[in-house]
Image (spheres, helix red, strand yellow):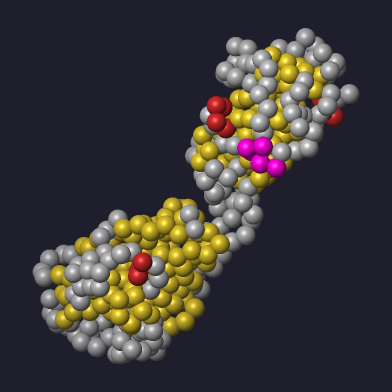
Amino acid sequence: GPASALLAALFLAAPAAAQVSGSLNWSTLGIADEAAVPSGTTQTSVGVTSTVTWSTVTDGGSFVPFAGANFVSYESSTQGGITGYAQVGFDNERQDPDDKVTLTISFSEAVSNVAFTLTDVDQASWDDFVEVFYDIGAGYVNAKTGSFVTSIGSAAAADDETFGDGWEGVASAASTSTDGNIAFNFGSLAVTAVRIVYFSGNDAGGGGFDPGGQQLGVGNVTFNKIPPNLSVSKTVVVSSLSSSAYAVPGSDVVYTISAQNLGNGSVDNNSIILIDRLPSQLTFYNADMDGAGPATGPVYFTQAAGTGLTFTPATDLRYSNAVAPPATFAACAYTPSPGYDANVRHVCLNPKGVMAGGAPLKSFSVSFRAQIK
């Protein structure tokens, strides 16, 4: 019959497509109260690594940290109803929107439902101004362009000035109050990073006015790990090394199993297991499957750039002679004979590493050869 009639069952084991919640939790970074948060600090949750970086810019004058050991520090107390937060603070000798602190939180993979709260955005002898940006892999976009603010206290309001487009303090808020809180949630967007830019507005006095120290808090950042979306297919063609150009008894055919991650989420480390059941009318070929071709053994593994997997035949390739599909990769315990071996009933593969998601499409394929009885 045609080669397509030789397709048999394919079993793929990978994590279930359920969302898992993670966070960047400031209180578990191991940083003492009011100690600096070093730029480059990382924390891993549900397999996603969050990296915290920060920097400052100034056009001169005295621009120094306030209320902590550096421009970004850890504060264990409660502000705006949030206990344990990153404190971004500075003391500027004049009210100058050109002097800024930029805090960036990058994720090792795209995540959804990114949410956090800024606290104590207000105005008194100072004027807090903050811009928030997000990145979905194509560059930073101002959060003012979407409906990402889920709540805002009475001491802050959206504002668009010549020097910034974000949110500004409009009244004084006590540290015990939520009046200066601004809560963000980026919903279903597959976010790779968020950026918070903090500086002085110009509504608290003239250009030469000394606003004194000012600070805001950044609460824990929560997110959902985006599940992968795996698609697997199998094709069979007559081998170029076959004695016949047709899928008839005595012909050799080549199976190719292709797997694609159609989603933005990555597959958990070392969790991909492929178990392919050979039809009873086939004899597996345990030798170099393509002669002078690129393969050097019975199974040929390839992957798209950036997929992130490795395949070592000595550890990642096994076989089974059982009639029933093996329940685990370890249960594939048959050692095939060289050349054609009719006892091979299942080919088992366990490529290692984390299979990435997102664009460009991540995929891999494995090929092997068998003879029609």
- Asked whether 287 or 163 is in front, the reply is 287
Q: Residue at x 34, y 75 (%)?
A: 84
Q: Residue at x 49, y 78 (%)?
A: 150
Which quarter of the figure has residue 130? bottom left
- Asked whether 165 or 9 is in front, the reply is 9
Q: Is-magenta flag for residue 328? A: yes
Q: Whole-percent x and y of residue 104? A: 34, 61
Q: Residue at x 80, y 11 (%)?
A: 244
Principal SS element in the magenta part?
loop
User: In the displayed structure, would residue 153 be above or below residue 114?
Assistant: below
Q: Whole-percent x and y of residue 212? A: 16, 81
For the N terminus, which image quadrant? top right
Residue lying furthest left in this view? 61
Is residue 164 visible from the viewing direction of this image? no
Q: Residue at x 25, y 60 (%)?
A: 38
Q: Which residues are magenta?
A: 327-331
Q: Is-magenta flag for residue 61? A: no
User: In the displayed structure, would residue 47 be above or below residue 65?
Assistant: above
User: In the displayed structure, would residue 371 be above or below residue 311?
Assistant: above
Relative placement, left or right, of 83 versus 94 is right
